[in-house]
Image: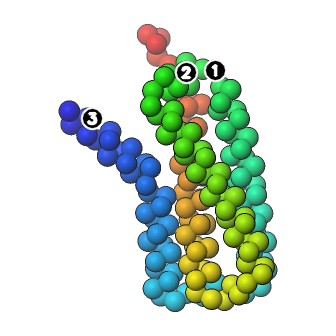
Amino acid sequence: MEKDIGLVMNIYVEKSYPYVIATAASYSWFKFNMVFPTGNDVLSASLTIGAILTGFLATAKTLLMTLDTPVMNRIRSTTYARDLASYLGESIWLCFGFCVFAMFGYFCSTASNWYGTVWMFIAIAAALAFIRVTTIMLKIIKHQPSKSS
């Protein structure tokens, strides 16, 4: 029973930590009235990074859907497959949203506190969602099934 509770708590943490950390960071940005850098360099870099990560994740999603390994087949037979698909989807949409928000910065005042606050939230949530998906995918790829499986 204790192990089941620990697993549920780990899944809850796994599902929420990108948003909790992003919320704390963006709140700090807002609270301390931080200023987003002026100029287009950060916006250009944000757009590039977001586009690269979106493309990588879309490719990873395609590969993961077609992966036919014992561990992937076992995951598909559980409810965790739904979580994994959700993580991939969230990560793709966050990275794509990061691109869109960076493009939006070309047409509005990035010197305002609200822009930096929202940018910080999306940037950190996207980065952590990407890390979460990458970590899980690497575990799937590295998994060596036991001889009894």
* Residue sitting nearer the eye, 58 or 35: 58
- Residue type marked 2: Asn
Label 2 sits on residue = 73
Q: In the image, what residue occupies the spot 51% across and 32% down?
A: 81
Label 3 sits on residue = 4
1 and 3 marks in contact (CB < 8 Å):
no
* Residue 107's disc number: none
User: Of callouts 1 and 3, which one flags the residue occurring earlier in the amino acid sequence?
Assistant: 3
Q: Residues within 10 Å of mark 2 (few under 14, many from 20)?
A: few
Q: In the image, what residue occupies the spot 73% across and 40% down?
A: 59
Label 1 sits on residue = 68
Mark 1 vs mark 3, CA separation in Å: 28 Å
Query: Where does the N terminus fall, quadrant-wise?
Result: top left
Q: Residues within 10 Å of mark 1 (few under 14, many from 20)?
A: few
Residue 29 at x, y = what percent? 51, 81
Residue 34 at x, y = what percent? 55, 87
User: Of callouts 2 and 1, which one flags the residue occurring earlier in the amino acid sequence?
Assistant: 1
User: Of callouts 2 and 3, which one flags the residue occurring earlier in the amino acid sequence?
Assistant: 3
Mark 2 vs mark 3, CA separation in Å: 22 Å
2 and 1 marks in contact (CB < 8 Å):
yes
Q: Quadrant of residue 70?
A: top right
- Residue type marked 1: Asp
Q: Quadrant of residue 2?
A: top left
Q: Quadrant of residue 108?
A: bottom right
Q: Residues within 10 Å of mark 3 (few under 14, many from 20)?
A: few
Instruction: Say which element carries label 3.
Output: helix
Residue 112 at x, y = what percent? 63, 89
Height in image: 98 above or below 41?
A: above
Q: In screen coordinates, is 84 left or right of 7? A: right
Mark 2 vs mark 1, CA separation in Å: 7 Å
